[in-house]
C-alpha cells in the first residue's frame, strides 16, 4: 500500500435488508491523515456504511476496501489499525468506566497509557463509577477516550458527540485535531453541521443511501453564498444588476438605506465596493455556511442535488 | 394566575393513562405467569387426585410426611394433611413458596424501577402523570394478575373435587402471599436505584421468610407467624379454615404499598436512598482477555443455576432415606417419579439426575441466549470492531458456557452424592451418582448445540432453542407419570441417556447425541461467521 492510498475506499455500495435498500450506490473515500465528515439525515445509511466498512456487514454489491484489504474477510487483522465509536455506545453496565476503558483498549492494536490518563482528566470522567450509573454523555466519553487513546491510523466515530455538553464537545474537537496532527485519519459521521465544519477537511453528504455531494470544504463553500446586510447613507447603485447578486431587498429606514442580499463568494469584493461608495453605516457579512448546502441537499431529491468536485483535492484546510 | 385548560383537570393524576401503559408493558409477562401458574396448579391437583384415589393411600402419604421434620421444613406443616386438599397443598407448597412471591416481585419491579432506570418513566412523568401514578398502576396491574391466577387455582382445585370454600381460601392465601411481595417490591423500587437490586432484595426477604417458616414449622414455634409464608400456611384451608389470617398479609401489603406511594410522591425522579459505592479504576489482566470478559458475563447466572441445582440435590439427598421409606409404603410415589421396579435409592438418584439435567440444560440455553442480549445491546458490534475475530469471540463464550455446565453438573451431583451418603449412611452411592450426572452431558450439549446453531444462523430464531428446552422439560417431568408414547418420549435427548443409575447407559446413543451437538454447534459457528452484525 502506498502512502497516498486511501484508508477507506467504497464504490457503488448497496445493502438490501429484506425489501429495504439501506445503501443504494454509495461512494466514500477517506484519505490518509484527513478528517472526513460523513453527513446525512437520520436513516440515510451512515451507520450501515460504517458497518460495511468495518466488515460487520457484507455489502449486497459494490466494492469496499479498508487499508487496501477486504474488511469482510480480514476484519480482525485490519481492525488492528483502527478504533471505532458506535452511535449507540454500548458497554457492560456492571463494569466501571475504567474497567471498560481497559476492556475496549485490549481489543485495539495498542493503547497509549499516558494519553489515556490525560484524556480521562480532560473529559472529567470518574473511572470508578459503574457504567449503569453513568449518563449517556459519560458513556460516550468512555468510548471516545478508548478510541482516542488507541494507537490507530483511523478513527471511525459514528455521531460521537450527541450526548456531550458544549464544553466537552470543545474538548472532543481539540482532541480530534490533535490526533489529526499526529497523522490519524478520522471518519466522522454526524448530522450536526457545526461539528463537521469545525473539524473536517473533506465532506461527503449522503441521502437515502447514496452520496449526493463530496469534496473539500472550500469546494462545497463555492456552492454556498455569503449573506450581506448593510445600512448605508445613500442608495447604493446597481446592486440588483451586479454579477453574482441575488435575493436583493432594499428599504428606507430613518433616513438610511437598508440592503439585504446574498452573493457568490467571488463577487463579494465588487459588492462591498458599491456599498462603500454609498457610505457604509453598519455592515454585516455572514460567511458562507455549509448549513445552506446541507439543508438544500436534504430537502431536494438526490438527482437534483449539486455534486462538487469528485474528491480529487485532498486535505485543503480552511 | 394562569387559567387552566379544562382538559388538564379531568384526570388530575393520570392514573388511567398510567394503567393503560403499564398493562401494555406487562400484558405478555402477566399472561405467561397466569397461564404457567394456573396450569401448574391444575396439573398438580389433577395428578395428585389421580394418584391418591383412596383414603388408605392418602394416609400413607400423610404418615410419610409426618415421619420426620425434613419434609415439614421444606413443604410446610400442612394442617389437614390426611385429606386430598392437604396432599395437594403439601405437593404444591415448595413451588408456591417461590413462584408466587416471584410473580409479585417481578411484575412490580418491571413496571416501576426498570422503567425508571431506562428513562422511559421520565418521558411519561414529563406529561401530566403524577409521580406516584406509576407505582399505583404497577400495584393494581400486579394485583389483578395475581387475582386472575387465584381464579385459575380455584378452578383447578374444584376440578380435583375439593369443596369450593376450602379451594377459595387456599387460592386467596396464595394470592395474599404474592400481593405482600408485590408491596415489598414497590417499596424496594423506591429505595434502590436498579431493578436488579429490587429483585435481589425481594429474594433475600423471601429466603428469610422461608427459613423462618421452616424453622418455626420444624420446632412448632411461634416464629412461623413472622413469615408471610407462615401466614399462607396458617390460613389452614384444608384444616381449621382460619379466614381471619388473610387480614395479616393484606394489612402488611397495604402498609408497604402506602409507604411506597408516599415515598414515590415525595422523592426526585431517578433518586434512591441506597446507592452503590465506587468500583475498581482499572480492569484486571484477566478481564481484558476475551475469556475473562465472557467469564465475567456468565458467572452470575451460572452461580444462580448452580445454587438451584445444589439446593435441589442437597434436599433430595437429605430426604433420600425418608423418600425410600415413603415409596415402600406407597408404590404410586415411585410410579409418579418414573422409578418403579428399581432399588429405591437408585431410583431417587436417577429421578434427581433427570431434574438436574433439566436445570443444567436450562442454564446452557439461557447462557447462550445472553449472547443475543449482548448483540441487541450493541456490545457484540463494539467487540468485533476490534482485533477480536468472530470465531474467537464466539468460541470464548462457548467455552465459558461449557465450563459453567460442567461446574453445575459436577457441583450438583457431588451435593446429591454427599447428601445421599449422609442420609443413607453409605458412601458407595457417590461414584455412581457422579457418573450418572456426567452421562447426561451429551443430552445437555444437544440443547447447547441447538442454542448455538440458532443464534449463529439467525438470533431471531432463538425461540426454537427455548421451545426445544420446553419440550425436553415437559417430557422429563411429566413423561413417566403420564405414560407418554415412546415416540414422544424419544423427542427429548434425555430419554436416550438410559435413566442412570437405574438403567444402563447406551454408549452408542451418547455418541450420536454428541455428534448431533457438535454438528449443530458447527452450523452455529459457520453461520455466525457469515451473517451481518448486529442482527436483532
Image (cartoon, grey):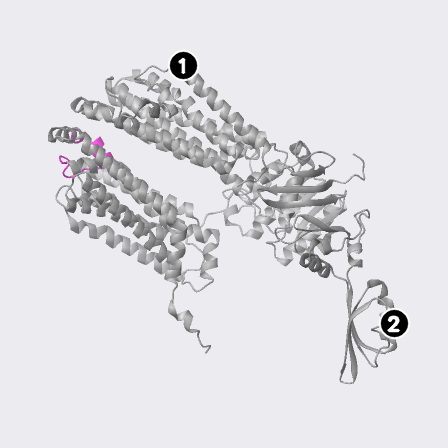
x, y (%) of residue B344? 24, 20
Alpha carbon distance from label 2 to label 1: 98 Å
- Left or right of B339 in this view: B530: right
Under circle 1, the secondary element is: helix
Mark 1 belongs to chain? B
Instruction: Give the residue at x 47% y 22%.
Output: B516
Instruction: Give the residue at x 24% y 53%.
Output: B250
Of B329 and A109, which appears nearest the observer? B329
- Circle 2 packing at 10 Å, graded few (<14), some (14-19), many (20+), is few
Mark 2 belongs to chain? A
x, y (%) of residue B299? 46, 34
- Circle 1 packing at 10 Å, graded few (<14), some (14-19), many (20+), is few
- Asked if marks 2 and 1 fall on the same chain, the answer is no
Instruction: Give the residue at x 38% y 67%.
Output: B11
Extreme-bottom residue of the structure: A255
Identify the magenta region: B65-83
**Residue A2, quarter of the rendered image:** top right
**Residue B527, quarter of the rendered image:** top right
Which numbered tag is attached to residue A193?
none
x, y (%) of residue B509? 41, 17
Measured along the vertical axis of the image, is residue A177 above or below residue B60? Answer: below
Tag count: 2
Which numbered tag is attached to residue B507?
1
B79 in magenta: yes
Residue B415 shows in this picture? no
Instruction: Give the residue at x 78% y 59%.
Output: A223
Say which residue label 2 marks.
A273
A301 in magenta: no
Of B82 and B76, which appears nearest the observer? B82
- Left or right of A3 in this view: B66: left
x, y (%) of residue A253? 75, 82
Amino acid at each position: 500500500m502506498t502512502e497516498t492510498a486511501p484508508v477507506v475506499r467504497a464504490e457503488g455500495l448497496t445493502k438490501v435488508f429484506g425489501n429495504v435498500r439501506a445503501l443504494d450506490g454509495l461512494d466514500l473515500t477517506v484519505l490518509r491523515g484527513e478528517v472526513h465528515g460523513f453527513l446525512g439525515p437520520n436513516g440515510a445509511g451512515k451507520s450501515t456504511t460504517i458497518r460495511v466498512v468495518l466488515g460487520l456487514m457484507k455489502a449486497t454489491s459494490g466494492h469496499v476496501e479498508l487499508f487496501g484489504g477486504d474488511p469482510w474477510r480480514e476484519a480482525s487483522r485490519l481492525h488492528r489499525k483502527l478504533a471505532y465509536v458506535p452511535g449507540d455506545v454500548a458497554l457492560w453496565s456492571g463494569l466501571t468506566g475504567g474497567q471498560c476503558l481497559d476492556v475496549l483498549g485490549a481489543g485495539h492494536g495498542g493503547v497509549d497509557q499516558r494519553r489515556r490518563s490525560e484524556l480521562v482528566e480532560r473529559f472529567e470522567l470518574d473511572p470508578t463509577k459503574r457504567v449503569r450509573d453513568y449518563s449517556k454523555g459519560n458513556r460516550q466519553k468512555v468510548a471516545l477516550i478508548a478510541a482516542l487513546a488507541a494507537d490507530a491510523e483511523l478513527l471511525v466515530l459514528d455521531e460521537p458527540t450527541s450526548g456531550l455538553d458544549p464544553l466537552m464537545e470543545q474538548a472532543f474537537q481539540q482532541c480530534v485535531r490533535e490526533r489529526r496532527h499526529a497523522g490519524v485519519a478520522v471518519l466522522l459521521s454526524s448530522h450536526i453541521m457545526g461539528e463537521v465544519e469545525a473539524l473536517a477537511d473533506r465532506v461527503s453528504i449522503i441521502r437515502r443511501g447514496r452520496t449526493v455531494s463530496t469534496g473539500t470544504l472550500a469546494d462545497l463553500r463555492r456552492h454556498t453564498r455569503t449573506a450581506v446586510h448593510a445600512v448605508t447613507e445613500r442608495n447604493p447603485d446597481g446592486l440588483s444588476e451586479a454579477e453574482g447578486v441575488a435575493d436583493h431587498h432594499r428599504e428606507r429606514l430613518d433616513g438610511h438605506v437598508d440592503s439585504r442580499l446574498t452573493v457568490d463568494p467571488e463577487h463579494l469584493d465588487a459588492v462591498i465596493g458599491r456599498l462603500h461608495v454609498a457610505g457604509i453605516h453598519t455592515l454585516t457579512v455572514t460567511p458562507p455556511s455549509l448549513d445552506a448546502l446541507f439543508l438544500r441537499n436534504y430537502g431536494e431529491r438526490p438527482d437534483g442535488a449539486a455534486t462538487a468536485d469528485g474528491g480529487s483535492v485532498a486535505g485543503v484546510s480552511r | 394566575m394562569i387559567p387552566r385548560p379544562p382538559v388538564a383537570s379531568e384526570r388530575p393524576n393520570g392514573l388511567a393513562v398510567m394503567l393503560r401503559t403499564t398493562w401494555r408493558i406487562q400484558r405478555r409477562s402477566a399472561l405467561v405467569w397466569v397461564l404457567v401458574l394456573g396450569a401448574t396448579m391444575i396439573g398438580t391437583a389433577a395428578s395428585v387426585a389421580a394418584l391418591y384415589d383412596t383414603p388408605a393411600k392418602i394416609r400413607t402419604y400423610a404418615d410419610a410426611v409426618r415421619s420426620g421434620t425434613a419434609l415439614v421444613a421444606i413443604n410446610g406443616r400442612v394442617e389437614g394433611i390426611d385429606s386430598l386438599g392437604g396432599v395437594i397443598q403439601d405437593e404444591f407448597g415448595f413451588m408456591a413458596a417461590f413462584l408466587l412471591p416471584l410473580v409479585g416481585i417481578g411484575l412490580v419491579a418491571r413496571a416501576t424501577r426498570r422503567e425508571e432506570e431506562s428513562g422511559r418513566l421520565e418521558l411519561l412523568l414529563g406529561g401530566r402523570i403524577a409521580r406516584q401514578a406509576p407505582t399505583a398502576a404497577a400495584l393494581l396491574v400486579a394485583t389483578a394478575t395475581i387475582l386472575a391466577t387465584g381464579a385459575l387455582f380455584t378452578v383447578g382445585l374444584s376440578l380435583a373435587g375439593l369443596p369450593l370454600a376450602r379451594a377459595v381460601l387456599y387460592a386467596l392465601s396464595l394470592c395474599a402471599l404474592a400481593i405482600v411481595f408485590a408491596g415489598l417490591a414497590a417499596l424496594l423500587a423506591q429505595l434502590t436505584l436498579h431493578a436488579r437490586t429490587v429483585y435481589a432484595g425481594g429474594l433475600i426477604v423471601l429466603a428469610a421468610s422461608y427459613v423462618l417458616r421452616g424453622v418455626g414449622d420444624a420446632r412448632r414455634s411461634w416464629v412461623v407467624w413472622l413469615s408471610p409464608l407462615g401466614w399462607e400456611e396458617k390460613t389452614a384451608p384444608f384444616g381449621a379454615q382460619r379466614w381471619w389470617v388473610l387480614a395479616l398479609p393484606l394489612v402488611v401489603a397495604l402498609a408497604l404499598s402506602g409507604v411506597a406511594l408516599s415515598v414515590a410522591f415525595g422523592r426526585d425522579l431517578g433518586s434512591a436512598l441506597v446507592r452503590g459505592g465506587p468500583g475498581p479504576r482499572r480492569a484486571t489482566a484477566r478481564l481484558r482477555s476475551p475469556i475473562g470478559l465472557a467469564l465475567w458475563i456468565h458467572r452470575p447466572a451460572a452461580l444462580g443455576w448452580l445454587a438451584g441445582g445444589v439446593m435441589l440435590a442437597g434436599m433430595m439427598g437429605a430426604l433420600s432415606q425418608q423418600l425410600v421409606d415413603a415409596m415402600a409404603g406407597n408404590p404410586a410415589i415411585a410410579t409418579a417419579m418414573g422409578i418403579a421396579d428399581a432399588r429405591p435409592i437408585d431410583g431417587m438418584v436417577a429421578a434427581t439426575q433427570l431434574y438436574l439435567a433439566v436445570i443444567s440444560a436450562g442454564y446452557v440455553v439461557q447462557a447462550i441466549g445472553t449472547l443475543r442480549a449482548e448483540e441487541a445491546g450493541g456490545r457484540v458490534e463494539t467487540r468485533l470492531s476490534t482485533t477480536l475475530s468472530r470465531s474467537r469471540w464466539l468460541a470464548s463464550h462457548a467455552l465459558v458456557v461449557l465450563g459453567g455446565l460442567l461446574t453445575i453438573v459436577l457441583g450438583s451431583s457431588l451435593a446429591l452424592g454427599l447428601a445421599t451418603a449422609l442420609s443413607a449412611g453409605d458412601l458407595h452411592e457417590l461414584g455412581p451418582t457422579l457418573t450418572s450426572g456426567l452421562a447426561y452431558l451429551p443430552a445437555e450439549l444437544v440443547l447447547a448445540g441447538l442454542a448455538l446453531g440458532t443464534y449463529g444462523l439467525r438470533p431471531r430464531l432463538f425461540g426454537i432453542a427455548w421451545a426445544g428446552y420446553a419440550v425436553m422439560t415437559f417430557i422429563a417431568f411429566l413423561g413417566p407419570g403420564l405414560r407418554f408414547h415412546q415416540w414422544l418420549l424419544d423427542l427429548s435427548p434425555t430419554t436416550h441417556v438410559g435413566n442412570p443409575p437405574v438403567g444402563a447407559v447406551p454408549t452408542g446413543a451418547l455418541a450420536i447425541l454428541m455428534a448431533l451437538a457438535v454438528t449443530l454447534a458447527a452450523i452455529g459457528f459457520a453461520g455466525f461467521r457469515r451473517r451481518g452484525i448486529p442482527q436483532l
